[in-house]
Amino acid sequence: MDTRFRKILVIGAVAFALAAPASQALLGFGLSASAFAGQGDSTLRAVGWAFSIWSLIYTGLVAYAIYQALPRNDGNPRLAALAVPSAVAIAGCGAWILASAFNARWLSVAIILVSAVSLSWALVRTPRAGSAAVGERLCVWWPLGLLAGWLTIATALNILTVMTAEGLLGGLARAAAFAGIVAVLVAALAGLRATRLAAFGAPVAWGLIGVWAAERAAKADVAALALGAAVLVAAYAAWQLRPAGRGG
C-alpha cells in the first residue's frame, strides 16, 4: 500500500469519526445516540456512564492517526496491514452516528457489525513483533484493541435494541437478554485468545459492568449474569498481561 494513501486514509477516517458526533451536537439534527437506543433498550441496556469510554477511545484514535503518520513509521508493515480495516471500523463509528440520527435501524446494525468484524479480524491476522516499541503498543494496538472490544459489546446491544424496537422479540425479551450477554462473553473470550491483547477485553468488561448497573434493579438475574461475565472477561484480559504472553 502506498504510504501516503495509508496516512491519508487513517487520518480521514479518524477525522470523520470525530466530526460526525460533533456536527450532530452543534447542528442538532436527527436522534441523539441515547434517543435512538431508548426506542428499544427495554431488553438489555448499559447505564449512561458506560459510554464515557468513548472519550478514551477517541483520544486513542487521535494518537493512532498521529503515530502512523510519523515519517519514521513509513516502512512499518503492521501499520500497512491495519490501515484499511482500521479505517473501515473507525469511519464506521461516524457512519453509525449518522444512521442512528436518521433512525436507520438495520443500517446501524450492518455498520456496527462490519466495523467490529473488520477490526477484530485485522487484529487477529496482523502479527505483532514481540519487541514492538512502547509507542506502537500505546498508540496502535491499545487504541485499536479498545475500539474492537467496545464494538463487540456495542454490536450485541445494538442488535437487541433494534430487534426490540422492531417488535421482533415479544415474550422472548428475557431470553434474548441472556443470549446477548452469553454471546458477548463468548466473543470476548475468543477475541482475547486470538489477539492476546488485553485492551480488547477491558472495554467489554466495562460495558458488562454498565449492563449490571443498569439492570440490577429490574432484572437481577440478567444483571448477575452480566457481572459474572465481566469478571471472567476482566480476569482473562489480565492474564494476557503476563510477561510470558504477547498481550499488550
Image (tube, rainbow, N blue to C red):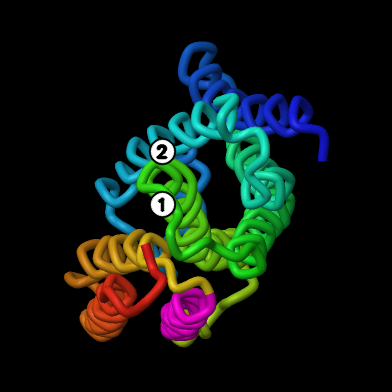
Q: Which mark is residue 60?
A: 2
Instruction: Please state the extent of the stretch shown in magenta in the rendering.
Output: 178-194
Overall secondary structure of the magenta section: helix
Up/down of 61 relative to 246, above or below: above
Instruction: Determine the residue located farthest toward the right in the rendered image.
Output: 1
Up/down of 209 relative to 86, above or below: below
Image quadrant where residue 117 sits: bottom right
Q: Residue at x 51, y 58 (%)?
A: 148
Where disc 2 sits, the SS reads helix
- In this view, the residue in front, 122 or 36, is 122
Mark 2 surroundings within 10 Å by alpha-carbon count, few (fewer than 14), some (14 through 19), many (20 or more):
many
Q: Residue at x 63, y 44 (%)?
A: 76
Residue 85 visible to the viewer: yes
Q: Mark 2 belongs to which amino acid?
A: Gly
Q: Which mark is residue 142?
A: 1
Is residue 180 rendered magenta in the image?
yes
Q: Residue at x 75, y 31 (%)?
A: 3
Percent position (x, y) of residue 169? Answer: 58, 76
Q: Tags 1 and 2 in contact by the CB under 8 Å rule?
A: yes
